[in-house]
Each structure stands twice: as structure tokens, then as C-alpha cells.
Amino acid sequence: MRVIVTIQHPGHVHFFKHAIAELESDGHSVHVFARENEVVTDLLESYDIDHEILAGESNSLLSLAAVQATYEAKLLARARRIKPDVITAIGGVAAAHVAKLVGAKSVVFYDTEHATIIKALAYPFADIVCTPECYDGDIGSKKVEYPGYHELAYLHPDRFEPEPGILEEAGLEPDDTLVVMRLSSWDSSHDMGQGGFDDPVEAVERLEDAGAEVVLTSEVPLPEELESNRLTTSPDRMHDLLAYADCFVGEGATMAAEAAVLGTPAVYVNSLSLGYTTELEETYGLVFNFNGLDRHARSLEKAISVIEEDDTEKWARRRERLLADRIDVTDVIVREVETVSGTGPERPTLAANAN
């Protein structure tokens, strides 16, 4: 089987990296194409994944459309040469379109309900759309649900064990109270017009006043006052740092979910809510969502209370409950790619999974 994997965000690298290795070990030919976005190239190189960058970054909705058009055109040219059996992606706009044009099957993974543009452009053309069970939306007969989250494709304990050396690498002591903070750029098509913190500088000051060491990762340039808080370690070590953090506070849903499945309480500060962040709060108590107009002040109050409570055993118990309910999502990726191509077992529960 010939498989194309498309990558348009750093999280996509993590999501597919184990599946790529397993598909290759099963004898399949895997071709990876990417759009540069933040640290995508660095991550692909750090995991030794052979790839080709087809388009650059964008900084507005208009430039995103131009970049996406370039990316699709180049992907189509590569696909005509490769003649893939399956094209797979997260979101999957380019994957679904190109697959139709070259006679391949497309398997799209997605978990973002409010991404209306991506859904409208990808879902009608996709053969299979895989979502977590908590995804809130009617996709029809092509929908396949699974009991997990994207982040469990790479942070399930069968796939990941944190390295304690990250604390020394980041200039931290084992007894430091560590908060990891994430700032978003808000230039994705589904983030336009949204927001998180009112004032990141004030947020960091409040957390530091509570006794925390704050380490920042950001998609946007930082104010001069926060440059000393910027994460300086390799981007592929972020999950090690999250695992040893006392709390995550940030605008990124992916990183909030990453923290949660690692057993680190996450304070998610964003005007948008998601099915999986809601479930991680209501069912497992590992994410705290702050979406309203008062999200800045209320989120900081919650983060400070988590820091002051300092109850690591509580978060560990909640994580164990989550892991007992949820699966290794890499197994789902490999199964769906092989099943849709006819090289894997049939999926007898497809109709039962469809909404």
C-alpha cells in the first residue's frame, strides 16, 4: 500500500509519528508532505521522518487561502506521481480533495467542532472522518468514532514516558512549582476573532507572585518583559516538561489536552469551547475551561488555587481513571488507513459508529 500523510501543524507531527513507523514496519510505503507552521520542520527532523515541505507559513486569512492553494496544487502533483492508495490528515482539506482527483481513499481525523470552513471544505469529499466519541456534530455515515483523544496517539503511556532530565535542561529545580503557559496566534481560520488572555504580562506576574516558575511557549512575538520566560529547550521536549509541570495555563486546546492526559491539571483560556476539553473537565476533572468575557481573571484565580492546593495524588488518580476508559489512538490511525485501503480487516462496527 502507498500512503500519503499530510502535516499542517506541529501537533500533526506528534499525532502521526508512531503510525508512520508502524505502517512502514508493516511493509507500506509512506510519503510525508508538510506545510511549514511554527516548528513543523524541526519536529519532523528530530523524529527522523523523511518529508517534503510544500508551502510556507501564513499570517492572515487571505494569505492562508493562498498558501493552502499552493499546498494543494503541489500535493496533487506529488500524488499523481506516487499514485497513493490512501491519503490521511488532520482536518484534511487538501487530503480529501487530492484523494478524489487521483482515485485514492481519504481518511480524515478531526476534533474541532467550530472549524466550519475546514469542515465544509473537507468532510463532503472525505471517505472516512474519524472523531473522538465526545465530538459534537453530525457527519453522517462516513463518521467513525473512537474512545480517545488525538493526544493519546503519542502520549498514551504505551507510547511515552517523560524524561526527568528536562527540568535541569530548562534550568529548573525538582522542587520548583512549574507552570507551563501557551499563547496562541489566533490566525487559523477557526480562530479568527477569538481571544484568550486580556494581558499575558499581568497573567505571568500573578502566577509568579503565587510562587510559580512560569515557562512560556508562544506562536506570537512576546513582550520584552516576558522574553526571560520563553522556553529555550528543544520543541520535542515540551511533553517532558508538561508531564513534570504543576499546572498548564494557556490558550491552546491541544496543549491543554496534552497536559490533561499526562496528569497535569490544565486551565484552558479561550473564547471557544470544544467537545474534548468539555469532556476532560466534566468527566475527568483534568481541564478547567474559561470561555466567557471574564475568562482572564477567573482562569488565573483557578490556576493559583491549583498551585496552592499542591495535590499531585489527586491529579494522578484522575489520570488513571481517564487511561482506564481511553485507548491508544495510534492503533485507530493504523487500523483505519489499512481498512479503507482493503489491506486490513473489515470494520464491522462502521454503521454502529455513524451518527
Image (spheres, rainbow, N blue to C red):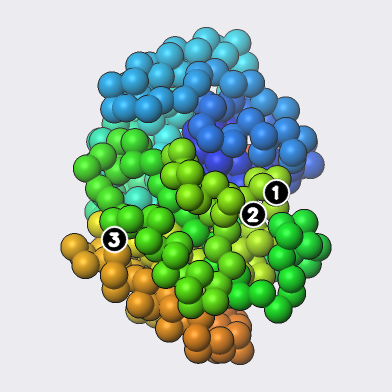
Which tag is nearer the camera, tag 3 or tag 2? 2
Above or below: residue 8 compared with residue 129: above
Residue in the picture at 29% in, 64% down: 296
Q: Give the residue at mark 3.
A: 273
Which tag is nearer the camera, tag 3 or tag 1? 1
Residue in the picture at 57% in, 54% down: 229
Mark 1 belongs to which amino acid? Thr
How far apart are the two marked residues, 2 and 1, measured between alpha carbons? 8 Å
Above or below: residue 208 compared with residue 340: below
How far apart are the two marked residues, 3 and 1, measured between alpha carbons? 30 Å
Mark 3: give few (<14), some (14-19) or many (20+) Cα within 10 Å: some
Q: Nearest the camera: 166 or 2?
A: 166
Q: Give the residue at mark 1.
A: 233
Q: Which mark is residue 315?
A: none
Residue in the picture at 22% in, 43% down: 193
Q: How far from the left and from the top, in percent, is residue 107?
A: 47, 39
Mark 3 belongs to which amino acid? Ser
How far apart are the two marked residues, 3 and 2, measured between alpha carbons? 24 Å
Mark 2 belongs to which amino acid? Met
Q: Nearest the camera: 252 or 179?
A: 179
> Could you tell which of marks 2 and 1 lies nearer the N-terminus?
1
Q: Give the residue at mark 2.
A: 238
Above or below: residue 255 compared with residue 115: below
Q: Could you tell me which secondary element the residue under label 3 belongs to?
A: loop
